[in-house]
Amino acid sequence: MTTHLLEIENLSKRFERQGGGVQALQNIRLQAEEGEFLTVIGPSGCGKSTLLRIVAGLDADYEGEVRLAGGRIAGPGIDKGFIFQEPRLFPWLTVEKNIAADLSLRDKATRRRVSELIELVKLNGFEKAYPRELSGGMAQRVAIARALLRNPRVLLLDEPFGALDAFTRAHMQEALLDIWQTNRTTMIFVTHDIDEAVFLANRVVILKPRPGEISSIVPVTLPYPRKKTTPVFQDLRLRVLSEFEKIEEVAWGESGAGI
Amino acid sequence: MNKVIEVKARTEATAAPDAESAGTPAVVRKKRHVRRRIGPLDIALGALIPVVGIAIWQFYSGSGRVDSFFLPSPLLIASTVADLGATGELFTHTGISLQRVLLGFLLGGGLGLIAGLLVGFSKRGEELFDPMLQLLRMTPNLAVAPLFILWFGFGELSKVVIIANGAFFPMYVNAVLGIRSVDNRLYEVSKVLAYSRFDTIRRLILPSSVPQLLLGVRLSLAVSWLSVVVAELINSTSGIGYLIYYGQYNSRTELIFVGILIFAVAGKGIDSLVRLLERRLLGWRDTYKG
């Protein structure tokens, strides 16, 4: 019966607050295939981070079905890698120990995998550096390597490049695509940047707020590597943007509750 | 492909001046900045005010304008130190005080650490112990010292207990604070990485609380050092506190100064040791260093 890696069916999530609750997600239905790159985009408060946290198992209080490789997601686990907006490295550990985390570098297989990953995220020479010595982009690459070491079935990224400057962000996107093409790890990438969403994805999932629902899904069939300046890219970008404007018109006037 | 990578690296280096396109040099340079050696100039700068102060002091006391009973001259104090050193008294008194401080600190600090971990890790432990301990924390050491003498006699035990009583609270408070100040965002990382309960404690909570634990050690040692004076002034026939008491009783003010001097030097010595440990253990911290 299971044909998809990730299956989300009739997922709803409500936050109860003083003076009424907020319907963060309503009847979300979404599938992701093995090796697919999915971006999720929407205005703030549309529940995109909530969706990602539920898939990660960080939030188990929801209605509906969320299955990874056929099994219902019950809690966090190493089969679901998670990249936060900030790198969240352990400041007292060096780069290689941050990547290894609870695994021992004395183990030969682990050590080899860690150096492979350091190679993959292009941090050679920084193995013994501490997080305070890294730039934002480098630190985020360490976080990606830390998640990849666990061979996750799916890598969940919650606006991972949102805090980076435009230049660093642009080549972090390229770096991530390189990694994806090498590793073929399934990616679910939350962002509020339309360019980023179109540049990376096989499919762009557009969410609309209050209640958080899927507004539309835009497939992106452009071959990689993509150029942001080409007319076809711009056409797709405009298509996503116009979807966005429809949402904004509906949502306009209501005070946005950032979730 | 390689060219692309190089270009990327360069772009990032320009975007973030912290990073260095050449790799390791950035790391090395930063480390050198952090672990700066203390040069002769630093020592001269730190010694400037004390040296000038002592010179003026010697000038006035030596010229006989100030009664030696009120303010003995630095030279008189120095010769007293030399005399006490020659007879060996200097070392026996310092030694016994050090021993009391160490035992009291180990007992009080150790118990404080255990209580702090208990309360820090368990909500129930906090409800059970913390209100009572906060109440006891507010009782001055000097006020309860007579009770300890009454209960534990005039021997070594009462002195060690008085010191332990002082050493307990700074360690306790900072251990609790350390555990409770773990960054929740890093806690989420430990969840995402599926850490076991044991790994969460060992790899997240304990390393996170090391700075606060070391602060606890420093403050606890400082209070131990203060408490030994209390213990030895009240009842003792040995130790630096006794030396001060003896000096006061026999109108030998220079002995009081010698006692103060030893306290200052030994206290600073111990504090420096802990700070050295701090630098070794906390090199990863990214804080303002002046």
Image (spheres, coloured by chain):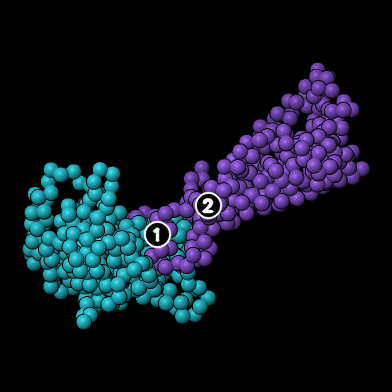
Chain colours: A cyan, B purple
10 Å neighbourhood of mark 2: few (<14), some, or many (≥20)? Answer: few
**Kind of residue sitting beneath label 2:** Arg
User: Are dots 1 and 2 on a single chain?
Assistant: yes
The quarter of the picture where residue A220 lies is bottom left
- Residue in the picture at 87% in, 32% down: B246
- Closer to us: A189 or B258: A189
**Measured from the top left, where is residue B41 in percent x and y?**
62, 42
The CA distance from mark 1 to mark 2 is 23 Å
The quarter of the picture where residue B228 lies is top right
Residue B188: give its label.
1
10 Å neighbourhood of mark 1: few (<14), some, or many (≥20)? Answer: some
- Residue in the picture at 18% in, 43% down: A255
| Horizontal arrangement in the rendering, residue B66 relative to residue B143 (left or right) | right
Instruction: Give above or below for B115 relative to B52.
Output: below
Helix, strand or loop for disc 2: helix
**Measured from the top left, where is residue B46 in percent x and y?**
64, 38
Is residue B146 at least partly visible in the picture? yes
**Kind of residue sitting beneath label 1:** Glu
Identify the subunit bearing mark 1: B
The residue beneath circle 2 is B124
- Closer to us: A147 or B273: A147
- Closer to us: B86 or A199: A199
Helix, strand or loop for disc 1: helix
| Horizontal arrangement in the rendering, residue B228 relative to residue B18 (left or right) | right
